Amino acid sequence: MTQPGLISVRGTYPSMGADYGRAARPAIEGNLEFYGRIWRDRAGLSDADLRHWGEVFAGQVRAYDAETADLVDGVAEGSGLDRRLVYALNAKLELLYGSGYQECACTSLAVLGSRTASGHTLLAQNWDWHPDVGPNTVLLSTTDTEGFGVLTLTEAGQVAKSGLNTAGIGVCANLLVSDRDTAGPGVPYAVLLRGVLQSRRMSDAIRAVTAPPRVGSGNVLMAARGGEAIDIEIVPDDFGHLLPRDGLITHANHFESDVVRRVSAGDVTRATARLTLLRPTRVRHLLVDALERRSVGPALVHEALSDHFSYPDGVCRHVDPRVAYPDRVVSAYSLIMDLDDATLRVTPHPVCESPTATYALAADGVVTVAGPEPAP
């Protein structure tokens, strides 16, 4: 894979959405084609079903945050695509709940500044997904009329996945699946992630995830400059949380808080997701010495995210030839954020050997690019 294309937009939320939609139309169409097959083949959804649920989710998003709804509406206008399908794309997981389909992916971590060499808070992850996602992935930079900026790696047409903002708040996403997840109205996971990135304070970021109605599960790891981090595991009607241990939080694709026990939910991916039970511990083992020395830095985090224990199913995932092509998963991109410097390092698959580019988010929302750096 190559570096994702950077799309920078400024202005009102409708105008930013329209500019985003125009710039990303081919990639949005690619994502609608890709997920259209999955929705049809795995969830049995017709085009009419997608348009119906798109309209339902449009109402949910509008009630949750008008600016985000304006952004999505703008994407549809600018791209010339059906507004309902753009909302469906932003609810890709919700449309699969109850179908048995699992996108088992991602290893994430946060390191507090008290344990890093620079004293800065680091937030990082490998985003694991199908090998075909690269051409349809973008780096989206939005700067509104107040100068508030967001930089997020996301699938074209969606409003957010993992990223950071000019308030010094960052977020990473991990799939979780419980047996309480079901199709129905609720605020989509991708929109909750945008809610975190729209927040100016950590208290608002937490409420953006825990307060709204939800129909599915997911993991949201967030951190902020100044040295705090929290992991929130959501299920449809409750949530649990994890705090740093020895300055580190790590997470993969199974529940680790008490939330599933508390609400008598079943953890669907615990037994089936590739190496999920070991990936967080493996990352901790790789960083433990540096944590004790308070010397963790981006290079060491990248080394941990490039780890090949249990290859090809390790933290750094590669194609498993035993798996049928539609179900294959790789570490599509590695992300490392320095929330004090407001930088985002992006390494495409294979993340263990590809060059890295660093994107700096200035206080006024302007994004500059350095790199790509040589591969390690």
Image: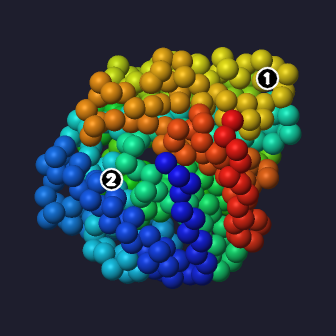
Q: Does 271 sit left or right of 245 as displayed?
A: left
Taking the view exactly as shown, the residue that stands out farthest to the front is 374
Q: Which mark is residue 8?
A: none
Secondary structure at badge 1 equals helix
Q: Which residue is mark 1?
A: 290
Kindly identify the amino acid type of the residue bearing the numbered disc 1.
Ala
Q: Does 241 sit left or right of 223 as displayed?
A: left
The reply to whether discs 1 and 2 touch (Cβ–Cβ < 8 Å) is: no
Q: Which residue is mark 2?
A: 92
Residue 202 position, x and y percent, is: 67, 51
Q: Does 297 sit left or right of 44 as displayed?
A: right
- Residue lying at 70% horizontally and 61% vertically, measured from the top left: 369
Secondary structure at badge 2 equals loop
Kindly identify the amino acid type of the residue bearing the numbered disc 2.
Lys
Alpha-carbon neighbours of circle 2 within 10 Å: few (<14), some, or many (≥20)?
Answer: many
State which quadrant residue 149 falls in. bottom right
Alpha-carbon neighbours of circle 1 within 10 Å: few (<14), some, or many (≥20)?
Answer: some
Which is more N-terminal, label 2 or label 1? Answer: 2
Query: Is residue 242 shown to the viewer in this render?
Result: no
Q: Nearer the viewer, residue 179 or 16?
A: 16
- Residue lying at 77% horizontally and 66% vertically, measured from the top left: 363
Front: mark 1 or 2: 1
State which quadrant residue 307 falls in. top right
